[in-house]
Image (cartoon, helix red, strand yellow):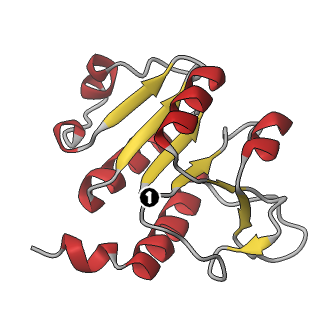
Amino acid sequence: MRIVLFQPDIPQNTGTILRMAACFGLAVDIIEPAGFNTSDRAFRRAGLDYLDHVDIHRHESTSAFEDWRRKSGHRLVLMTTRGDIPHHAFDYRADDLLMFGRESAGVPERMHEAADARVVIPMRAGLRSLNVAVSAAIVTAEAMRQTGLFDKEKS
């Protein structure tokens, strides 16, 4: 299982997600351009001491990511307020790519079309969305629970 961040805007959210991924043993894919410097040096300067414990793969563009995804054969599961399946009702697989959109704008329509599934976290009507790092934690925990990845991480 991998977490995919589509052109993230906010470095603190990305840092929180990277730390979670390190703790859970998950890789993170970042689709550029981001709204901030995503080099290892910039992350270290920001105090991300978990950086040595997370596998980060940077994709220079959406096209580069899609090329990699097609070759790797991973299923793309998009988290979106426009999703049609509640996150807890979706049947995750251990090799899924869990994509989270840009804080300011989500993902473009072409990513909605490319997704194999569009999943939503149910919440109260009239509210826009959850913070992306909170959303990533909720969905990742459910996906790991369903696939048994939590059991494999115990040490």
Residue 131 image position (x, y, % from top left): 62, 55
User: Which residue shows up at 29% across the image and 61% down it?
Assistant: 24
Closer to the camera, 35 or 27?
27
Mark 1 belongs to which amino acid?
A: Asp
The answer to whether residue 100 is above or below residue 92 is above
- Place residue 88 in its image quadrant: bottom right
Closer to the camera, 54 or 16?
54
At label 1, counting other C-alpha atoms closer than 10 Å, the crowd grade (few under 14, some 14-19, many 20 or more) is few
Quadrant where the C terminus lies? bottom left
Determine whether, in the image, residue 74 is placed left or right of residue 155. Answer: right
Determine whether, in the image, residue 63 is placed left or right of residue 17. Answer: right
What residue is pinned by disc 1? 95
- Place residue 86 in its image quadrant: bottom right
- Place residue 152 in its image quadrant: bottom left
User: Which residue shows up at 58% across the image and 61% down it?
Assistant: 135
Closer to the camera, 35 or 154?
154
